[in-house]
Image (cartoon, rainbow, N blue to C red):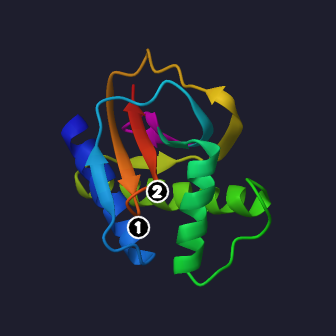
Amino acid sequence: MIEKVHAAVLTAASEVFNEMGVDPVLVKEIEAPRPEYDVIASVGFTGELHGFLQFQGDKEEVISFISIISKLLGMEPEGEGFGPFQTSTLTELTNQLAGRISMHLEKSGINTNITPPTIMTGSNLNSDISSIRESTICRISIDDTTGLDAFFGAQ
């Protein structure tokens, strides 16, 4: 099943960010998540597959990522730092990516639903992934220096 999940994550990430004007978007598998992040956006998956998707990054990475995406969509980021605009944008990006993954899983015969996104911010955040049976993680880069990690874990 992890092969189907992995393919769904990679395909969904490419599609979602290409539709936003990121061309090319680089979606590259990485071996493991970093031990700590400053921002984690999470969506749960239920149904035939129980798990979660997390978009993870350092605060400055997330701010830069959102700024670039916003400009590609013809918007100017509001406020300084990681405020309501950045939170809302990251929530929407996470929701779109999770929805597209769910759609691709459905096409491969795995029926899922998604939960509403949750955003966590702080210092040195990490996820306990010890109960995860299967996972895939990739780096989604939208230019030479800006990207976020996408982690999908299933129980």
Q: Seen in the image, is 4 located left or right of residue 142?
A: left
Q: Seen in the image, is 140 located left or right of residue 107?
A: right
User: Considering depth in this image, is 127 or 67 the residue closer to the camera?
Assistant: 67
Q: Is residue 77 above or below residue 65?
A: below
Instruction: Indicate which disc, 2 or 1, sits on the residue closer to the N terminus.
Output: 1
User: Considering depth in this image, is 43 or 110 the residue closer to the camera?
Assistant: 43
Quadrant occupied by the N terminus: top left
Residue bearing the label numbered 1: 16
Q: Is residue 60 above or below residue 74?
A: above
Q: Name the spot of residue 42 as percent of width and height, x first.
A: 57, 42
User: Is residue 9 within the magenta segment?
Assistant: no
Taking the spot 50% from the left edge, 62% from the top edge, the residue there is 96
The residue sitting at the top extreme is 130
Amino acid at dot 1: Val
User: Considering depth in this image, is 64 or 69 the residue closer to the camera?
Assistant: 64
Residue bearing the label numbered 2: 146
Quadrant occupied by the C terminus: top left
